[in-house]
Image (cartoon, rainbow, N blue to C red):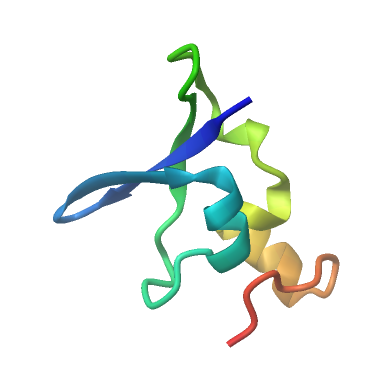
Amino acid sequence: MNLWVSVEHPWGSFAMPLDDWIASGPVARPLLRPSSVIDQDTGTIYPVSKIPLRYRNSTWSRWLIRMGLFKNPWPV
């Protein structure tokens, strides 16, 4: 599967490969998070739940990281 994440930003949305998102995360924009997952080969759109929880950068995943239940995938 050739999965990409769609990320919404106030200046517009952008997409990047899921592997790149997992490797680098939101970089300098700590509150950015994926809004969907797209299979580039078929055009199928998946929910964010397709991304492992610790890489979603949601309020819930950041809280779980702060509580020590997950290791921070993108330490500063």
- For residue 64, above or below residue 18: below
Question: In the rendered image, is residue 64 in sight?
Answer: yes
**Residue ranking furthest to the left:** 11
**Residue ranking furthest to the right:** 69
Left or right of 58, for residue 50 = right
Q: Considering the image in quadrants, where does the N terminus appear?
A: top right
Residue 27 percent coordinates (x, y): 44, 73
- Residue visible at 80% across and 72% down? 71
- For residue 53, above or below residue 4: below
Left or right of 69, for residue 56 = left
Q: Considering the image in quadrants, where does the C terminus appear?
A: bottom right
- Residue visible at 54% across and 55% down? 20
Residue 30 percent coordinates (x, y): 44, 72
- For residue 67, above or below residue 53: below
| Quadrant in the rendering for residue 52 | top right
Q: Nearer the viewer, residue 16 or 58?
A: 16
Q: Nearer the viewer, residue 66 or 51?
A: 51
Q: Nearer the viewer, residue 69 or 15?
A: 15
Question: In the rendered image, is residue 58 in sight?
Answer: no
Left or right of 13, for residue 20 = right
Residue 22 percent coordinates (x, y): 62, 56
Residue 32 percent coordinates (x, y): 40, 60
For the image, the number of numbered tags is: 0
Q: Nearer the viewer, residue 57 or 74?
A: 74
- Residue visible at 38% across and 78% down? 28
